[in-house]
Amino acid sequence: MSEGDAASKAKMLKKAKEAMADKKPQGIEHKIAGKKDEEITLTQADLPAHPVLHLQGNEGCSITIGEGVSVIKIMIESCKHCKIMIPATAHITTSVVEIWRCDGLEVDAALEIGTLQLDMCPKLEVQFAKVEQLGQMVQAGVGELRLTFVDQPGHNTVTGTAALRAGVCPHLAEGDVTTQFTTRYIAIEDGGEKQLLTEEVLRLANDFPTTAREKAEHDKNIKQKQKALEEIAGSYLSGVKAVPETTQKALKTELAKAAKAVSTDLGAEATVDARAEYRRQLGNEQFKIGEYQQAAVHYTEAIQMKGDIPAVWCNRAMCWLKLANADKALADADECIKLDPAYTKGYFRRGVALYELARYREACESYGKVLKQDPANDQAKASLRLAERKLASEP
């Protein structure tokens, strides 16, 4: 091998290693699963760096997040009759706790939780030390939820499907697990007294989540702005004989924008395409700041709305790679390629997933397909060399 070839190969290997390093997760999942009737106290020493705590399939357990423990996020899945205790000295970086498919679960939180997401749970109990520690609770498909506050028991409430149907949402169907409701401790009017308020989540035309109360206020503001603009324009035009043509055009443009805002935002139903695109964009934004799990959630929502967009499957595959879940990444990359056999990034994601699964021969084939479509792709060239090197070293 010539010195030039050796230098070229070394350069390619360096690029490949840098590319693979970029796929490693910034948040590392730490799973506690399948435990029964155990008392568990987690310390920081028990956890990896940047831990995403995932409690899955536990039963009859008491799990305490230790004093001073810091995690990125807490996910609780399919746990039964467990009690989870989160002390005031713990820290949740994203301030997000997600709970789904749990029954008989008790959560005792002594710290602020910005977003508490509850999905498809027959029965839950959640207690906060202070009512102010509840940022926003979003529920869908929850049978019965007891929400209590140590400092202000007068705000204790029982919510869930039956209570919601009897109150804020009479049209809620039995078995509905998609309609969302938000509960917040807020003042409805400026300077007013705060109260615990539960509202149905609605969607504007761009799928932006809101409530009927907030939407009515939003609509009112738009109408007021349009009326004020019309009055200003009318007064201006009537008071001056010779209005410059550029000024007339500017006023007409502003009026057109206001009218469009009203017609677009007032009561418009979101199309499936618009909602899916909005979720995709949310996923992109979360991915940019390193929130790969949350990005995957948004991409999943986009896929559920419209599952024929190759880019979304490809993006979610990248999230799974960041979260060290190569199996899921491979499945999503395969679906991406199935939808669009010419989607180059899909083959690259597939190659990375196969490499992580130590399936080097197949990884080489995927990288080869990338290069067939994009011969100048240096990242694919470097990754192919690395995979070939691993394949050659196998017995």
Image: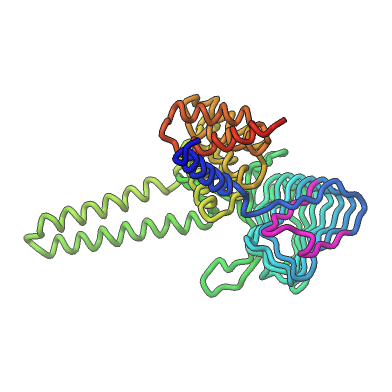
- For the magenta stretch, what is the residue range? 40-56
| Picture coordinates of residue 291, whole percent (x, y) | 58, 53
Residue 245 in sight here: yes
Give the residue drawn at x 56%, y 46%: 17
Which is nearer the eye, 147 or 195?
A: 147
Residue 154 visible in image:
no
Q: Residue at x 15, y 60 (%)?
A: 237
Q: Which residue is depicted at the point 53% across and 69% down?
A: 189
How many marks do you count on the picture? 0
Residue 288 vs 110, above or below: the answer is above
Is 323 in front, or is 249? 323
In the displayed structure, does residue 219 sit left or right of residue 94?
left
- Residue 256 position (above or below residue 188): above
**Residue under the point 47% across and 41% down:** 3
* Residue 384: percent from left, percent from top: 54, 34
Q: Which of 49 and 99 is in front in this view?
A: 49
Q: Quadrant of the C terminus?
A: top right
Q: Quadrant of the rendered structure where residue 63 is? A: bottom right
Q: Residue furthest left?
A: 242
Residue 275 at what x, y percent from top left? 50, 41
Q: Where is residue 235 in the image (x, y as percent from the top left)?
A: 19, 63
Say whether residue 152 is magenta.
no
- Describe residue 197's horizontal placement relative to residue 124 as left or right: left
- Residue 232 sits above or below residue 99 on the image: below
